[in-house]
Image (cartoon, helix red, strand yellow):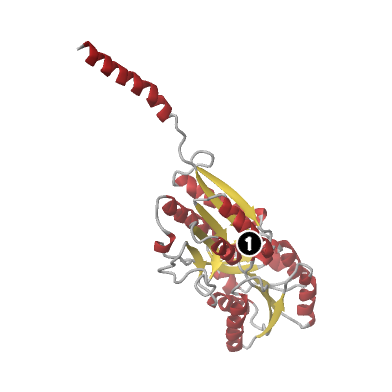
Amino acid sequence: MNKKIFCVALSALFLALNFPAQAQQPKKVARICYLGNTTSTSAIDMKLFRKRLSELGYIEGQNIAIEYRYFDGKVERLPELAAELVRLNCEVIVAIGNEAAGAAKKATKEIPIVMASTSDAVRSGLVASLARPGGNITGLTSMGSEIPGKRLEVLKEMIPKLSRVGFLWSPTSPVAADNLKETETVARSLRVEILSLEVKRPDDNERVFQAATNKRAEGLLVDGSGFFTANQKQIIDLAIKHRLPAMYPNTRSVEAGGLMTYAGDRSEQYRRAADYVDKILKGAKPADLPVERPKKFELVINLKAAKQIGLTIPPNVLARADKVIK
């Protein structure tokens, strides 16, 4: 009996000594890697992303850690940055824009990737299809090449006599050439001439805007790319300087002083990106998560920018705006 009591007491002592050590084991911290363009343009979007993660129970420093890398419009840096994130053994990579998503996809076939703010992910080769993305990448993408044409239609409504429009694009974007072709197709039906304005370096911007003015462009369409996001302020300032009514690819450019945009709800995209991350951290595979497209598109107009270039917005266009910045 004494031996039995001794064994029970010894077991209880062992459990008592071992339990605190187990209880104090730190929780696993999931590492999320973020590959974006610039710190300034990502600040608002990442705030929304982190807020949604917090709502889902993820707190930085407690159960998640986020590693940030920015390519600042220099697409040639993306392979190096993507490889650096892969070496960190992230649980998931969040890639912003076609260029970043493409670089992440080339860097790893194993780590799950959530893309956001991309354009036509199927046509650009990021996923096999929206319903069945396949591989290790999923997330959010725009509707594709029809959007640039729609933006031209809105610009034409704003300026009924519009006959010549510059299309500002960068070859760093994998969908820019197709967007230009689609815009030219829509332009023919509207009897509008499209001037192709290709930009490769920041030094090209002043020259290209001057060329647009010399060729009597009456409006401007700015295509989406990491290059233009990184050089956002310069593009906006040049459009105002040359008094060109410009249509931008996203709301952030209009909030920064650009004239107008017709685009998907960017805020919702970043919240949804957090939802994708949550599902992946809980075990879901990117190949099984359908890619989402925007459910809502917004027309945003900046009246201050209109005043700066001496443009009066027609009442019917202003009435249709989802958001007006004064």
Q: Quadrant of residue 263?
A: bottom right
Amino acid at pointer 1: Pro
Name above or below for residue 117 compared with residue 43.
below
Residue at numbered disc 1: 79
Question: Is 325 on the left or on the right of 1, as rendered?
Answer: right
Pick out the residue farthest to the top.
2
**Residue 323 visible to an observer of this rendering:** no
Tell me the residue at 71%/78% (across/down).
197
Question: Residue 86 in the image: x percent, y percent?
Answer: 56, 54
Name above or below for residue 79 compared with residue 215.
above
Along the viewing direction, whichever of 29 and 197 lies nearer the viewer: 29
Q: Which SS class for mark 1?
A: helix
Rate crowding at label 1 as few (under 14), some (14 to 19) or many (20 or more) other CA atoms within 10 Å: some
Pick out the residue farthest to the front.
3
Question: Residue 287 in the image: x percent, y percent?
Answer: 42, 63
Question: Residue 162 in the image: x percent, y percent?
Answer: 67, 82
Question: Residue 43 in the image: x percent, y percent?
Answer: 62, 52
Q: Quadrant of residue 316?
A: bottom right
Name above or below for residue 152 compared with residue 127.
below
Q: Quadrant of residue 314?
A: bottom right
